[in-house]
Amino acid sequence: MKLSRERFQQLVQEAMKAVPRKYLKQIRNVAILVEDYSPPGQNLLGLYHGVPLNHRGSYYGNVPPDVIVLYKVPIESLCWTEDQVRERIEEVLLHEIGHYFGLDEKTLREIEARRLRINIKKTDPVQ
């Protein structure tokens, strides 16, 4: 599924609505960017660059923004529909925001697995 850059960026903005308000209030000085491809040799859907919130001390200040990058082409390559792209963007964005808050990969994967189980229960017609 291939979208225009503008549409993809709109979906990224919409995905920010999935971030709970209590966390959105804490996000400061973060740029969210869209690039076509991840760096050569890296198979990534997104990447967080910066100092995680829980690692900042009193010394932290006067620094450029942290950056969350979403990689458009790899995300699109996993999807057949715009709804799937939307879901994947939300998943990747929430993952990278988790890194901003200092969560490690293992913790994020556990959270994502719980979220997936909840979503499956919501859509399961047998329930």
Image (cartoon, grey):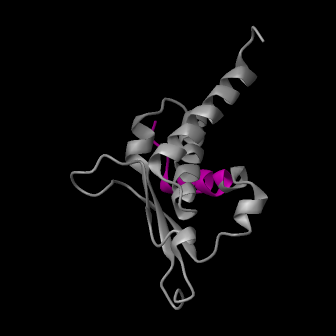
Q: Residue at x 56, y 69 (%)?
A: 54
* Residue 4 position in % (x across, y down): 49, 50
Vertical side of 68 occupied by 119: above or below: above
Could you tell whether 25 is left or right of 54 in the image? right
Secondary structure that dominates the magenta span? helix
* Residue 91 position in % (x across, y down): 56, 44
Q: Residue at x 59, y 51 (%)?
A: 94
Image quarter for residue 28?
bottom right
Asked if residue 26 lies in the magenta stretch, the reply is no
Vertical side of 126 occupied by 37: above or below: below
Numbered range of the magenta stretch: 1-15
Between 112 and 55, the one lying in front of the other is 55
Could you tell whether 22 is left or right of 35 in the image? right
Could you tell whether 30 is left or right of 14 in the image? left
Asked if residue 5 lies in the magenta stretch, the reply is yes
The furthest residue to the left: 41
Image quarter for residue 39?
bottom left
Image quarter for residue 88?
top right
Q: Quadrant of the C terminus?
A: top right
Vertical side of 86 occupied by 52: above or below: below
* Residue 58 position in % (x across, y down): 57, 87
Q: Residue at x 48, y 69 (%)?
A: 67
Vertical side of 99 occupied by 82: above or below: above
Q: Residue at x 47, y 44 (%)?
A: 106
Could you tell whether 31 is left or right of 123 in the image? left
The mark total stands at: 0
* Residue 78 position in % (x across, y down): 43, 34
Between 54 and 78, the one lying in front of the other is 54
